[in-house]
Amino acid sequence: MRWRFSRQVGAVAAIFVVLAGWSTTSAANNSAKLSAVSGASSSTAASSTTIPLPRRNGVTLTVATVNNPDMVTVEGLTSNYFTKETGIKVNYVTLPEDQLRAKVTTDVATGAGKFDVATIGTYDAPIWAKNKWAVPFTPLLNSMPAATRNAYALTDIFPSIRDALSYKGRLYAVPFYGESSMLYYRKDIFSAKHINMPLHPTWSQVAAAAKKVNSNSVHGICLRGIPGWGEVLAPLDTVINTFGGRWYDMSWNAQLTTAPVKAAVNFYVNLVRNYGEPGASSDGFTECETLMSTGKVAMWVDATVAAGFLEDPKQSLEAGKIGFAYAPVQRTPKGSHWLWAWALGVEGASKNKAAAAEFITWATSRQYINLVGTTKGWVTIPPGSRASTYTNSNYLKAAGSFAGTVKSSILSANQHNATLQPVPYVGIQYVDIPEFEGMGQSVSELMSAAVAGRISVNSALSQAQKLAANAAIKGGYKK
Amino acid sequence: MALKQRLGSTVATLAVYIITILIVFPIVWMVLTGFKDEVSAYQMPPSLIFTPILDNLNDALNSGIMTYIYHSIIAVGVSTIAALALGIPAAFALVWHPRKSNEGVLFWLISTKFMPAVGVLIPLYVIFKDVHLLDTLLALIIVYTAVNLPLVVWIMYSFFSDIPKELLEAGRVDGASDWQVLARILLPISLPGVAVAGLLSVIFSWNEFLFAVTFTYTDAPTVPVFVSSYMTAEGLFWARMSMALSLAIVVPVLLGWIAQRQLIRGLTLGAVKG
Amino acid sequence: MADVTTPVLRTEPVVSKREAQQSSTERRLFLSPALILVGLVTQIAFLATIYISMLSWNLVRPDQGIHFVGLSNYSSMLSSSTFMTALINTLVLTVGVLVAGMVIGLLLALLLNRSFPLRPLVRTLLITPFFVMPVATAEIWRNMLLNPVYGLIAWLLQQVGMTPPDVLGSQPLLGVGIMLTWEWFPFFMLILLGGLQSLPEDLIEAAHIDGAGPFAVFRHITIPHLQRYIAVSTLFGLIYLLGVFGEIFVGTQGGPGDASTNLPFLIYRTAFNDWDVGAASALAVIAVLITIVIATGFNRVLLRMTGYGEAQ
């Protein structure tokens, strides 16, 4: 039976066993979970946890996904809970974020159109919509039976995320999971040093605390420094926002050498250089997650999805010692925490749009979240996408210590109003124009160099200013 | 004097041992890490003695690595055989029927390797899309054959050039056909060259990533794409990654070990034979 | 003694003239399949690249359309400071790894060219890094060895009370160079070992009898003999090192700043981050031209090193 379990639930079960850090010695745990799955007969288990969908035998979908643990989970559950019910086969192309974006963009932009479903972020969705690379999701959903629509409950999805995935009022993709940013800190270290961390800290308080807790064995704070607009620029942009800075003024003049931006970047770079982790210019989310969960740093400001990981004793050495607070604020709360979602959209060139929409409906439904909760454990569900997740008592039991903070961070992140002064662009931790991918990448490299101490903040910003100004002209925004 | 020499020799031998251990250590450590759990993978100092777990191995096998290995074996195997099958006669023709244009032909062949692969990705992608070869092993086979052919011609040309003239003349006097000369006289004494040309072709195409990740989707991805699909921006991954990387390098490393005697002879382009 | 002149240089006929026409047909029959395949794949792609390099074509801005812009992609790329940095980085990295790999390779070849216990095993182990995938090399070095917090080298330095350096942050080109040297020295070692093994022993014995010490033998016999092997491995290494991509893509992402960006990585960035396909193609054409210049120049040096020029 054990063998059958491993065959059936397949790769993902194994991945989670590994991710959870279980060795073969914790077999007791394994078999406990096993009986939970095999307790119900497979067909009833499937129908009670799956959204009602029609059968379409002989259809095969190609889905592009980003290689995050949540996506790996859906990959493993597909054959037993989606294909078995609908007859629709699903092939996945899984890649890290940057390579995935390169691959799907090449695919759609050259008209190859070999993907039916693409995993895109909040940054990509409006661009895809504008280029007609994706088709609106709502009409596809509306053509499904009422039972399916009701079970799906589109309005249960957080409005801020639906908004971020829309273009000109039409929804183009639905979130698989969503995130904002928040502050993690080590309660034990803070109380030993008699430092109080408020629920709504300011960056000045964080810097003061980093100075106090910083030691040779535990560094004060972990912040991203690795190049990439989705890497170092994400937290740095939230700091720029809350310090009162912005990328462009209303006439698309670059603003990166203005006083608030200078103050923000100087603050970030000084903080990480003085009290941050060594080698920060090579660190992104994963590296900071490693440092935080192995007790090498005392604070970390990053994505809310890390909370479940840090609180999981099977994955984190410091579980139970982690405190949670809102992302720090300085001059304005606007744009102090980001908004991101990985979402699924139907490619414009897909020949199986109805089946593709049905797959998306399944993978982003409440029922799917329930399925993951009951089979893999509630702490591992894809979070941050639906209000119902945050009223689910099972989830709150597992994630009560941070769920409230995460939910209100996501709900209050407004990508149309993320700066103190008005801006012509949309986005909190990015500028939602196609040129930002290249320009942001170049700017992020300059910021990374500043974090490494290779160039001064002023020189980095004056070069960045030129890049930003060029992008506004090249993109045809600045008249 | 003799004692001093012996002492020097012992020191040199010890130095080689130490250097070898240092150089191989990263690979050994990576393989061992593949048998650890994520938390102990980051422990310092690294534990060399531990209870191995097979979770990462099962995990990799369940993620379908065998399919990727199968794709790699087909793409790399067929393209290598094709490169040898086309390259050996070409090198032979250059030696057997030499012309003034030989130098130009050889330089042109090598010059095709000056183009950075990234530079031709999008043009080739569009071409393969138009001829409906995207996501096929044939696309990879065509590219790998073309990329490795210059290498094969180059190496084989050197080997053939070093064959004593008398031997070739004997073949000519015999009135043997070109194929007979190639098959009976040249090939048998050039096997180290064939081995090294084949091995280098296998290594370079087995490890090739950009073409593979760009031209394939679900029907033809190779091992480097598998490795890439294992990289994640979220979550601890080093133990899983180590296992994936270890599995990914097994084939070229084993082949290299088996063929290394030929490598020494072959890499010197025929100079050491006999 | 066997001849190791590189094929590029060897043009003298191996055999005397024969009936030209028949020979030409046969030459074509044997040669053309290879040339046609290489030509089709590489030249079509290259011509397409040259054509695209004269277009203004942004993949993510279909609304802007595709226009013919002549050579303006070239002028804007050639005048950008990142291009110069990438070019210099490419050359520094290539030359650095060639020299380091060659020195280490020669040292180890000398050490291996003696008989001692376990010699085949040692040789087998030493060449292993050459077979490892670039992605794997970069992951091993970036995470396990060079990470200043949880890397092995950091831990070792902390044990002796030193502050571990942030190699990839402060000396990224050096870091990438170390990875590449680790990967490529076995290749040089093998070629040079082959060269050493082909060194006639009676030559060395004769020198010893003449009273030459080991260093004199090394300088006046071994090194001149190895020159052509060095030349061959340099040309090989040059072709592959100029095109290094995976180690930088995974190891440093070209950063911090553009400190470890080389030409292939810059082309990738331009094509797949800026989505400026025209400019990326222009860079690719420039890279080919630069490589041809280097290789042609190198060919001349090679002529002298292999002694081919004197034989003429």
Image (cartoon, coloured by chain):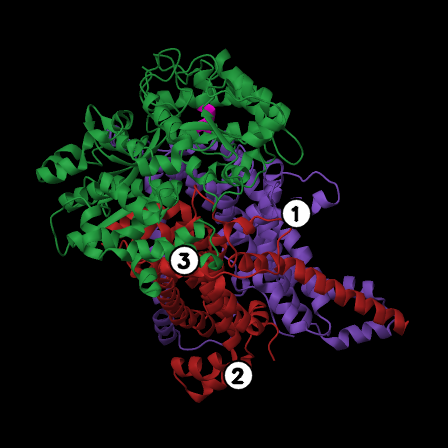
Q: Is A462 displayed left or right of A362 in the figure?
A: right
Rendered residue at 22%/46% (across/down): A49
Specify the subunit that label 3 lies on.
B
Return the x and y of residue A331 as percentages of the image width and height. 46, 12
The chain displayed green equals A
Helix, strand or loop at label 3? It is helix
The chain displayed red equals B
Q: Which residue is mark 2?
A: B167
Amino acid of disc 2: Leu
User: With respect to residue B117, does A135 lie above or below?
Assistant: above
Which of label 1 and label 2 is nearer to you? 1
Rendered residue at 44%/89% (across/down): B174
Q: Which residue is mark 1?
A: C153
* Magenta-highlighted residues: A233-237
Specify the subunit that label 2 lies on.
B
Return the x and y of residue A25 as percentages of the image width and height. 49, 59
Disc number for residue B59: 3
Q: CA distance from mark 1 to mark 2?
A: 56 Å
Q: Is residue C97 visible?
A: yes
User: With respect to residue A395, does A197 lie above or below?
Assistant: above
Q: Is residue A236 magenta?
A: yes
Q: CA distance from mark 2 to mark 3?
A: 57 Å
